[in-house]
């Protein structure tokens, strides 16, 4: 009798392990890219007031483009107030250092450009 060669009993396990490893790497890369984009390019914000309605009504989500460098009147922006809270506002005027913002529930505010998160590019209702 010939010695019988031992066949791998579960070649599908090896195949599955390889596929799961590839999937894990793909998910990790996608997660790193998504977090990088959120941190540097765009971020979603939730409107809790009607400060810039009807463009961004209460309970809407808005996608904010963080790389916007210039602002013109009627642009909708998100900025951080003195407490670091994100606020929506409508641009009245802007220069290189400051943006004058209006909100439905408050008087006009002058915001340093460094406190502006970015410009709203998309809003869901």
Image (cartoon, grey):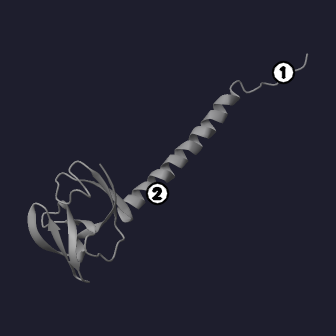
List the single residue furthest toward the right: 1
For the residue carrying disc 1, how many other residues have a C-alpha within 10 Å: few (<14), some (14-19), or many (20+)? Answer: few
Alpha carbons under labels 2 and 1: distance apart:
51 Å
Q: Is residue 62 left or right of residue 115?
A: right
Mark closest to the chain's N terminus, 2 or 1: 1
Mark 2 residue crowding within 10 angstroms, few (<14) / some (14–19) / many (20+):
few
| Number of marks present in the image shown | 2
Question: Residue 8 is drawn in which quadrant?
Answer: top right
Corner quadrant of residue 68: bottom left
Name the residue at 39% across, 64% down. 41
Q: In the image, what residue occupies the spot 45% across and 51% down?
A: 31
In the shown orientation, is residue 81 left or right of residue 56? left
Locate the N terminus and report the quarter of the image it occupies. top right
- Going by the picture, which residue comes out furthest to the bottom? 96
Residue 71's spot in the image, x, y percent? 29, 75
User: Which residue position is annotated with label 1?
Assistant: 4
| Residue nearest the observer in this picture, 66 or 119 | 119
Q: Residue 48: give x, y in percent of width and height.
A: 18, 51
The residue labelled by disc 2 is 33
Residue 95 percent across, percent down from the top left: 24, 83
Helix, strand or loop status at disc 2: helix
Location of residue 59 in the rendering, given as x and y in whole percent from the top left corner: 23, 48
């Amino acid at each position: 009798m010939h010695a019988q060669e031992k066949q791998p009993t579960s070649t599908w396990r090896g195949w599955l392990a390889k596929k799961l490893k590839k999937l894990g790497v793909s998910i990790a890369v996608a997660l790193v890219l998504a977090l990088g984009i959120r941190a540097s390019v765009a971020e979603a914000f939730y409107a809790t007031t009607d400060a810039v309605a009807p463009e961004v009504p209460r309970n809407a989500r808005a996608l904010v483009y963080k790389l916007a460098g210039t602002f013109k009147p009627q642009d909708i922006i998100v900025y951080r107030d003195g407490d670091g809270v994100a606020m929506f506002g409508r641009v009245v005027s802007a220069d290189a250092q400051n943006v004058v913002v209006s909100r439905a529930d408050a008087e006009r505010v002058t915001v340093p450009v460094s406190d502006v998160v970015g410009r709203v590019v998309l809003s869901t209702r």
